[in-house]
Image (cartoon, rainbow, N blue to C red):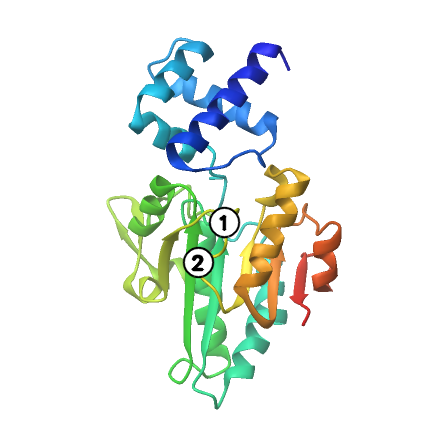
Amino acid sequence: MEDSEAKAIESVRQHLKRSRGLDISGYSSTFVLRSLRKRVGRSRANDLPDYLRLVRSSEEETTEFIGALSINVTDFFRDAGAFEALSEKVIRPVIKSKVGTGGIVRIWSAGCATGQELYTLAMCLEQELRRTGNMENIIGTVTGGDLSKSAIAFARKGVYTKEQVKNVPPQLLLEYFDERDEKYEVGDRLRRRVRFVNEDLLSEPVSRFFDIVVCRNVLIYFSRTMHDQVVMNLHRSLRPNGYLMLGRTESLLGSPRLHYDLMDAENRIFKKKE
C-alpha cells in the first residue's frame, strides 16, 4: 500500500470520527481502501485526493461512504445446507422450548444488508412453526440490523429481481412473494414477522434477548480487536443458552471463543455459555 493511500485511509477515518462519531479503526485498511475506490468510481470525484475533498465537504457523500462500508454481498438461502442445519438443529428446538409458555422466538439477522438473509430466516422460522404445529400459539419475529441506511431501506421495501430470487425454492417463492412487473415483492405474511434497525455492530447492542443471532460473512472484514468486540456484543444480545451462527469461512478467535460452546463445526453454529 502506498503512503498516499495510507494517508487517505487515516484522513477518512478521522473525518468519520469527527463528523459522525463513527470509529472505523477496526476495519482493515484493505477494506477501507476498497470502499474509497468504489466511491471514487461512483461519485463525481476524479481521483482519490479529489474524493477526500468531496467527502469532507458533503454530508450526503459522507452518508454514501458509510453505506459503502456496509457488507452488502448477500443472497437468499446462501449456502442452503447451512439454513437446513439452522432450521433442524436450532430453530426447531428453540420453538419446542417455548411450547406452553406463550413464548416468542426472536432472531436477529446482524448485518442484514439488503434483506435476503433476513427474509430467508423469516421463511425458515415460519416453516418450522408450521412443522411443529405452533403457528398460532408462538410468536416468531426476525430483526434485521445494518449500518447502512440505504441497505435497510432496500430491505424494508422488499422488492427483488428474478435473478435475485433464483435460489428461493419454487414453493416458497409462490407462498411468500407476489410477482409484479417481472419483480418479486415480499408478501404480507413475511412482512408481519420482520422489523428493521440501523445498528453498528461495534457499538453496545441496542437490541437484546434474542434466541438466535445470525451474523454471516461479516467478521472477516474486521481487525482482530474489533472481531473480539463484535463477538462479545453479539454475546450480550443473546438470551441465556442462545445460539450464534457465523459464515462457513469464519471462526471465533481468542478469549471470546471461551464464551461459546461449538454445536456444529461445519455450519459454524455456537451456543452461548452461562
Q: Where on the picture, by quarter, is residue 60?
A: top left
Q: Type of residue at label 1?
A: Ser
Q: Residue 56, relative to residue 175: is it above or below?
A: above
State the separation of the CA atoms marked 2 and 1: 8 Å
Q: Residue at x 63, y 70 (%)?
A: 89
Quadrant location, the N terminus:
top right
Q: Mark 2 points at which residue?
A: 206
* Residue 175 x/y as whole percent: 36, 64
Q: What element carries label 2?
A: loop
Quadrant location, the C terminus:
bottom right
* Residue 34 x/y as whole percent: 53, 24
Labels 2 & 1 near each other (Cβ < 8 A): yes
Which residue ends up furthest to the bottom in the rendered image?
100
Q: Which residue is drawn at 55% across and 66% down?
A: 238
Q: Name the residue under label 1.
A: 203
Disc 2 residue crowd, few under 14, some 14–19, many 20+, Cα 10 Å: few
Which residue ends up furthest to the left in the rendered image?
181
Q: Camera-side residue: 120 or 166? A: 120
Which residue ends up furthest to the front in the rendered image?
18
Q: Camera-side residue: 121 or 203? A: 203
* Residue 194 x/y as whole percent: 37, 62
* Residue 98 x/y as whole percent: 51, 83
Question: With 136 as the anchor, is 179 left or right in this view?
Answer: left
Q: Residue at x 42, y 33 (%)?
A: 66
Q: What element carries label 1?
A: loop
Q: Type of residue at label 2?
A: Val
Question: With 231 as the anchor, is 185 left or right in this view?
Answer: left
Disc 1 residue crowd, few under 14, some 14–19, many 20+, Cα 10 Å: few
Q: Residue 9, relative to residue 237: is it above or below?
A: above
